[in-house]
Image (tube, rainbow, N blue to C red):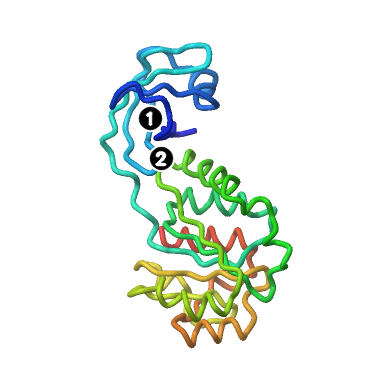
Amino acid sequence: MNIIHLHRDDLWLDHNTVMIRDRRCQHICAVLRASVGDTIRVGLLGGAQGEGRIEEIGDSAVRLHVQLHQSPPVRHRFDIVLALPRPKMLRRIFRTVAEFGVANLHLINSARVEKSYWQSPLLKPAKVAEALQAGMERSRDTVAPVVHQHLLFRPFVEDVLREICADRPCWIAAIGARRPLGDAASAPAVVMIGPEGGFVPFEIELAQRVVAETVHLGPRILRVDTALTSVLALGA
């Protein structure tokens, strides 16, 4: 952990004093090897960040006096629309969007997405939150990406995509597109990334009719998680 997350339902003794337990307490003691009087980086989930001075270390709890005076890091300039990947990639996907500070991740269906993927237990809210928190702890963030799930492609594109793009451009990654995303990565945008093998022609054409413009991520075929990281690095 590069930041200790504080929860609103932790035991707050007053406005600035909190008792924390669970793995956070273990991390402070066993990994950071902190002592009474030491200061560590802390942040309130969904809120501000700052420092916590250790006032007491017990067998199963640590008491901190906290000062939260820093805003969370700015959000990434891209919102991501991603065809649901294979379940084995999901944890990595969630950690990655959290590390980059993405505000919204829209998981969508696609012709090349297996129906069984939507049954993955990793899509349950608790599992999603756990993976997002791991990325936030690594990148010193306190604001989690909002993960949206859309089980039907056409209704998403026709009814939702234009709304989420608002006044921003919408880019859809497509093999053979003329324009590289790198030429368009300087402004806030929505970027659509397909499944393994990419979006099928009908999906690209529908997205184009509604709002999207095609871009490419280079001449090579990329795995979904590699494509996602490449997109986010371009927009960072």
- Which numbered disc covers residue 122? none
* Residue 201, picture quadrant: bottom right
Residue drawn 47% across the image and 69% down it: 191
Q: Quadrant of the C terminus?
A: bottom left
Given residues 166 and 2, the one toward you in this image is 166
Residue at position x 69%, y 73% in the image: 112
Q: Position of residue 103 (x, y in %)?
A: 42, 57
Residue 41 tag number: 1
Residue at mark 2? 45
Q: Which amino acid is tagged 1?
A: Arg
Instruction: Give the residue at the far left of this rendering.
Output: 69
Q: Position of residue 174 (x, y in %)?
A: 57, 77
Q: Is residue 138 left or right of residue 220?
A: left
- Residue at 57% x, 50% y: name it: 125
For the residue carrying disc 1, how many other residues have a C-alpha within 10 Å: few (<14), some (14-19), or many (20+)? some
Q: Amino acid at mark 2?
A: Leu
Looking at the image, residue 32 lies above or below residue 84: above
For discs 2 and 1, the disc positioned in front in the rendered view = 2
Marks 2/1 in contact by CB < 8 Å: the verdict is: no
Nearer to us in this view, 31 or 48 = 48
- Mark 2 residue element: loop
Q: Residues within 10 Å of mark 2 (few under 14, many from 20)?
A: some
Label 1: element kind: strand
Vertical order, 193 against 123 (above or below): below
Q: Quadrant of residue 11?
A: top left
* Vertical relation: 138 (above or below) 172: above
Query: Who's the residue at 48% across and 49% down the image?
Result: 98
